[in-house]
Amino acid sequence: MRAVICRAWGEVETLTVEDAATPAPQRGQVLIDVKATAVNYADALMVAGRYQTRPPFPFSPGLETAGVVAACGEGVTRFAVGDRVMAILAYGGLAEMALADEAETFAVPDGMPFDEAGAFPIAYISSHVAIRWQGRLEVGETLLVLGAAGGVGLTAVEIGKALGARVIAAASTAEKLAVARERGADETVDYATEKLTERVLALTDGKGVDVCFDPVGGELFDAALSSLGWGGRILLVGFVGGVPQIPANRLLVKHRAALGSSLRYFRWHAPDKLRRSVEELLGWYGEGKLRPCITHRVPLERSVEAIRLLTDRKAHGKVVVVPDGR
């Protein structure tokens, strides 16, 4: 099989596409004939050696994938050869064949194309876990989404609407905000030209928002925290802009909460809730409430370009690598 190979920590430009041995599924694993794998910001962190997972060399990055089951390891009962599936991976998705644990592999519903399935697990499940289980967003509440045109941000917009919330999308350009509007955002904030806190307070009659979904961090965090109303919850799901410091007194006086949410750890500690998240998400997909936004589809040989589109912030939505180039 062909695979994107990392042989040393460094920039993604050091990755190469090589012939590699096809892995064999171990107990509780399935081998997937990959049809589509979405790239994530974490792929660049993993290649640099700065991610929580540091696989042994050589390895292939890629944290999610979709395809057809090619083989099943001992003990696998939920899937059979030929099943259409998508999966969350420890690594290895940027290859023609990938291994996945049965517990983190899910059936692809009829009517969902493989490119959408390959772009579905990380962004949608991460956002749902944060908003549903940590943020406890309720019908009629207001959700502020930062980075609202990104691969994760757009899913948060859709999930907020599916849960019956009013959604305020925040991003850095009018073009990105237009994309968020297409996905259901009720109001928008351009934080490149507007002051985030002032605009949010104006949109909420001075009350502030109930929940803020923050995959950005950095300089925006302080303004986002100030945008919360009494009892507001800010969800920390990523730090592409830098890791912020949280002044505890500002949480106390307005009964606010700052909550971290990581799919990587959640799926190990709360597998039942993970399954319920996937069921609800796929139900919404079937109802037409979720539409994965894929802006680029590239062959395996252009995987470095695919990752750079994300790290250089040149893409909204998801970037998908298609091994057979179609």
Image (tube, grey):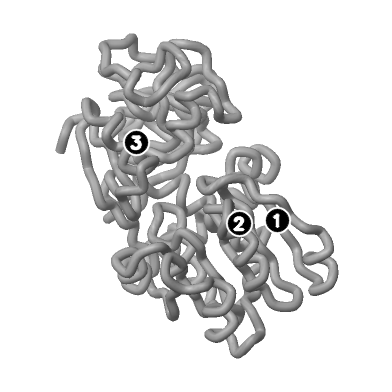
Label 1 or label 3, whichever comes before in sequence order: 1
Q: Is residue 134 left or right of residue 34?
A: right
Q: Which residue is mark 1?
A: 259
For the N terminus, the quadrant is: top left
Q: Quarter holding the C terminus?
A: top left
Residue 297 figure quarter: top left
Which mark, by number, is residue 206? Answer: none
Q: Position of residue 150 (x, y in %)?
A: 40, 55
Which of disc 1 and disc 2 is earlier in sequence?
A: 2
Residue found farthest to the bottom:
205
> Which mark's residue is nearer the viewer, 2 or 3?
3
Furthest residue in direction left, as rendered: 326
Q: Which mark is residue 130?
A: 2
- Residue 288 visible somewhere in the drawing: no
Q: Nearer the viewer, residue 188 or 26?
A: 188
Q: Is the Cβ of the residue at disc 1 closer than 8 Å to that at disc 3?
A: no
Query: Marks 1 and 3, Cα distance to the nearest angstrom?
Result: 28 Å
Which residue does the image show at 45% across and 24% down from the upper left?
Answer: 47
Q: Find residue 126 and report its horizontal and vertical position in percent.
A: 53, 50
Q: Which residue is mark 3?
A: 307
Instruction: Say whether marks 2 and 1 touch (CB < 8 Å).
Output: yes
Residue type at mark 1? Answer: Leu
Is residue 318 shown left or right of residue 273?
Answer: left
